[in-house]
Amino acid sequence: MKNIENNTFISICYDIFTEAIHQRTFPGAAMGVAWGDPGKRRRIIQTYGHTTYSQENRVAESTVYDLASLSKPLATTLAVLVLLRERRIKLSDRVSDIFPRTTPSLHRISIRDLLCHSAGFPAHRPYYLELAGLAEEKRKEALLGLLAAEPLVYEPGSTSIYSDLGFMLLGLIVEKKSGLELARFFREKISAPLGLADTIFYCGTRSGNTGKKIHAPTEECPIRNTLLCGEVSDENCHALGGVAGHAGLFGTICGVLEMGVHLLDQWQGREEPPNYLASDLGQFLIRQDIPGSTWGLGFDTPSATGSSGGRYLAPTSAGHLGFTGTSFWIDPTRDLVMVLLSNRVHPSRENTRIKQFRPLFHDTVVEGLGLV
């Protein structure tokens, strides 16, 4: 494979990001790419545009983005891996093993089902409408009750529907089995041991993590009647204090890229994770045998056609998308990690131009680095 000079690659990326900003795909963005094994690894991080269309702050490497559903693989799924190593849970454990008083429909659901988005849940429910009227200390218990009362829309394990609900439940399971709030568990067991606690973290409503950090605003929220900045966009997560199993994680381009590099090296057996097993991680990154599904355990794999990862990703690749305009993909055959952070939902989530940009970005990276 021939490597094209970095300056040429950077110029190509500049062109596609500049055009995307002109087309108002997003006001700005950050990209990070790492490729090669550790001895020869190269990294390129570039930032483009501004955090808003008013052009007050340029996007920088230190700009913090709402990672949205990247919380699912990078926080909740890794937390499950930690609990597996500590033998506090098994993938075969049923929800009723952990929450015995739940309804019979949840007794059929395993932790594996939740990770695979094959638990029978619908994609989304506006639970915040009910949770917001309760005292904060009662909301997690109320959420468990709402999940327990949720009618399943298909038989667990028979197919897969991408669902926030399953990961909300996984977040509650992590807290129940660890005895710690999810944000603290993530920091102590995952981000801090990797040296990433300052660059990938939860921004809970009481965390104080915003500090002097520059955040890329997300949307003008009609429910909260404000422009969201340093405050999680997802309404259900916000109702839970900004920390949940399906959303709430924030990060910089450097933090997410380095997390991806760690995952790649752990996957390839070149690095032993601090608090979970590389062999377990490897099993999580493999597509599961579920009809009509591309899901591994907490991680997605490329679809055969129309993948957001573009035309070139190996079928064994793993990654995830975030609703706010974020994504990462790891291709083990190319020793390649690609990260895109944007606030495409600014000022409105109705903007869907990111759907066309994502595959263009990934194809540009693979072609531009000579990795076709």
Image (cartoon, helix red, strand yellow):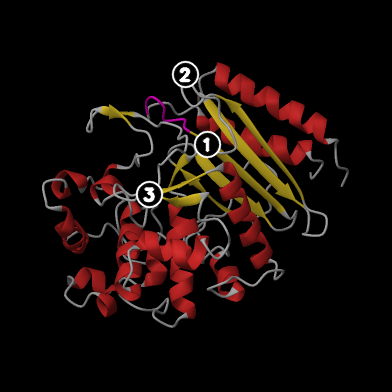
The residue under label 3 is 248
Q: Position of residue 149 (x, y in %)?
A: 16, 61
Residue topped by disc 2: 53
- Which residue type does callout 1 highlight? Thr
Identify which residue, 307 or 325, lies in the foreground. Answer: 325
> Which residue position holds label 1?
63
Mark sitting earlier along the chain (1/2): 2
**Residue 18 pos. (x, y %):** 63, 21
Q: Secondary structure at mark 3?
A: loop
86 w.r.t. 199: above or below: below
Dominant SS in magenta? loop
- State whether residue 35 appears in this view: yes
Please tell me whether mark 3 or mark 1 is closer to you in this view.
Answer: 1
Q: Residue furthest right?
A: 2
Q: Please state which amino acid type lies under the numbered disc 3.
A: Gly
Residue 12, x across and y down, in percent? 74, 27
From the viewer's perspective, is residue 197 above or below residue 225?
below
Callout 2 secondary element: loop
Magenta stretch: includes residue 344: yes
| Mark 3 or 1, nearer chain start | 1
* Apparent side of residue 206 relative to residue 127 in the rendered image (left or right): right
How busy is the neighbourhood of tag 2: few (under 14 within 10 Å), some, or many (20 plus)?
Answer: some
Q: Position of residue 201 (x, y in %)?
A: 45, 52
Residue 303 in view of the camera: no
**Who is closer to the viewer here, 3 or 211?**
211
Q: How busy is the neighbourhood of tag 3: few (under 14 within 10 Å), some, or many (20 plus)? A: many
Q: Which residues are magenta?
A: 343-348
Name, please, the residue furthest toward the bottom: 87
